[in-house]
Amino acid sequence: MVKSCAKCDFEGYCKRFLKSKSKRSRIFEIQPRWVQLKQQARDRLLSPEGIEIRVNRSCQVEGAFGVIKQNMDYKRFRRRSMGRVTVEFALTCLGMNIRKYLRFAMSGVLPFYWVAPESLKAETFKTPSAKRIKNRMEKKRKLQPNEIAKKGYRRKGKY
């Protein structure tokens, strides 16, 4: 339990979703297992192997859907229920994978994947800064509701 939020730099950020913002303290619950799993996932993503996987995945997934839509001329599902659509799409993906396998088997050339160099070091996670969060919260507070609404309007001509 936090005794007082009076001089805390995180006060605005912390209380942004509370209904009653006039309370002096707030209850925090920390789940050690969840924090441990989150840190473990972050470490894996920021490691050289994680960087390599992220780089390769970013260029593979979008291309596969583009090939299915453009090259295979597959633009719409021809079935109605969710189960049948799932089977139809699974068969389409299977056909695409067989095409890809045959292309690589005939040419003898495997696809290129980016390999992380030996000298690549793990990335570091940017720690949250109370000053940065406070500045972000102040920028949001400066706009009045009518100013926010004005941004959404498109004016044609002069009034």
Image: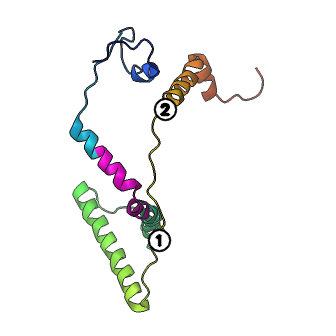
Residue appearing at x 53%, y 27% in the figure = 131
Q: Main secondary structure of the magenta part?
A: helix
Relative to residue 126, is residue 159 drawn left or right?
A: right
Q: In the image, which is nearer the foreground, mark 2 or mark 1?
A: 2
Q: Is residue 75 visible?
A: no
On whether residue 148 falls in the magenta region, the answer is no
Distance from label 2 to label 1 (Cα)?
34 Å
Magenta span: 38-53
Q: Tell me, for residue 77, which label it has, or none.
A: none
Quadrant where the C terminus sits is top right
User: How far across and down, in percent of the image, does residue 14 sit?
Assistant: 40, 22
Which residue, given by chain and number where applicable, does mark 1 sit on? 114
Which residue, given by chain and number where applicable, does mark 2 sit on? 129
- Pointer 2 with pointer 1, Cβ within 8 A: no
Give the answer, above or below, for where 41 lies relative to 49: above
Residue appearing at x 33%, y 70% in the figure = 93
On whether residue 39 falls in the magenta region, the answer is yes
